[in-house]
Amino acid sequence: MGNKDWGCSSDVGLLGRLVTSAAMAALIAACAAENGEETTGLDNQAATVAGPTAGASGGSPPPPAESPANPSAGAASTGMGAASDPPAAPEQPQEPPSGGLQADPKMTTPATAGPDLPAATPAMMEADRRPEEMMEQTGDPGAAPNSTDTEDPQMLPEVADPPATPMDYGEGDGSDVVTIGDSWMDYALSGGGIEGALRRAGKQYRNYSRSGTQFLNGVIPGQYARAKRANADIKTVVMTGGGNDILLGGYSCDTREQCQRYVEALVEGLNELWTEMSNDGVQNVLYINYSRDAGSTPDDARPAMRPVAEICESGPIRCHRLETTDLVMGSFVDGIHPTRAANERIAAAVMEMMEQEGMRR
């Protein structure tokens, strides 16, 4: 190509294969400026126009993606050296005429990174990722990579479990509910005591209580033993016990220390009895406390707190305690035993607690 003169009438189709689009635009402009006269030295003009494009990045452009074997292209690559006395090309670019020259699609001109093209950044590269890749990671083609719809379980605040609702063992015919105790449970002069009030309310429980009995001498625990011998299917026990141990058993409650020793002995005996009940399959025991104003013991001598039997904290049996001071309201037959009306209130509170706590009833 070096010795051939290329004029404006030359084969522009072949020339389009050898020079870049910018050089071709410059060549067309030069031919138009000469009003169609034949011009020589176009090789040098093409080299002059193409030179700055190739050197903008500081070196030769990278090879194209496809490299077809083209001897003419190779000659153009090696023949464009430094040119002598090239004619000046116009400064203003001109758009090619409609339907004008087009570059051969078989030739690829690689884009060169120049000062007007910003270097690729990680954000640009990330934005150019295919939606399919994002879909594989997130399930949403528009979502950012590695994003998740759920929070880290370890970062979630802990939520306390709701309190467990006690199992309701339901209401039966009363054959698996037993009442034991002293005259607070069964006393003829007060309408049959608490047991009499329960019967009037329609509860037919198995009653083994007896007036004048004590707990620490083993009589009241013996009532449970008799009930078990008669029918061992017992699910709930309602009881009183311990009041006569002060009146008849020699325990003195003149001081708080003396009353505290009595209460500790009573709790130890209850723990032994309720442990036996738990082993027998009894599910619930309801202990009815004596009213604080029953009897003649000074109020300041009564223990401020009642200890809890150990089995109530460790065993499967559930222990319930019913306070009666506000139910009796100071209404006694003889200063010790509640009146019939007071027993009615106590019996109503017993039935309400059994239902609320899900006891067999």
Image: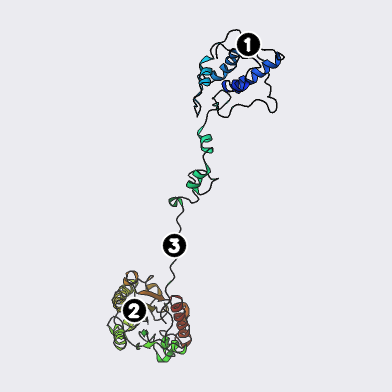
Could you classify mark 1 by the number of other residues whose Cα lies within 10 Å: few (under 14), some (14-19), or many (20 or more)? some
Q: Which residue is mark 2?
A: 282
Residue 119 coordinates in the image, percent (x, y): 53, 28
Residue 202 lies left or right of residue 15; in this view the side is left
Instruction: For mark 2, give the secondary structure.
Output: loop
Q: The N terminus appears in which quarter of the rendering?
A: top right
Q: Nearer the viewer, residue 202 or 145?
A: 145
Marks 3/1: CA–CA distance:
94 Å
User: Sequence-wise, which precedes: disc 2 or disc 1?
Assistant: 1
Q: Nearer the viewer, residue 185 or 339?
A: 185
Instruction: For mark 3, give the secondary structure.
Output: loop
Instruction: For mark 1, give the secondary structure.
Output: loop
> Which numbered disc, 2 or 3, marks the residue closer to the eye?
3
Marks 2/3: CA–CA distance:
28 Å
Using the rendered view, name the quadrant where residue 272 is placed: bottom left
Residue 327 coordinates in the image, percent (x, y): 47, 79
Could you classify mark 2 by the number of other residues whose Cα lies within 10 Å: few (under 14), some (14-19), or many (20 or more)? many
Residue 161 is tagged as 3
Residue 40 is tagged as 1
Residue 250 lies left or right of residue 60; in this view the side is left
User: Sequence-wise, which precedes: disc 3 or disc 1?
Assistant: 1
User: Sequence-wise, which precedes: disc 2 or disc 3?
Assistant: 3
Residue 7 coordinates in the image, percent (x, y): 64, 14
The answer to whether residue 202 is seen in the rendering is: yes
Could you classify mark 3 by the number of other residues whose Cα lies within 10 Å: few (under 14), some (14-19), or many (20 or more)? few
- Residue type at tag 2: Val
The answer to whether residue 330 is seen in the rendering is: no
- Residue type at tag 3: Asp
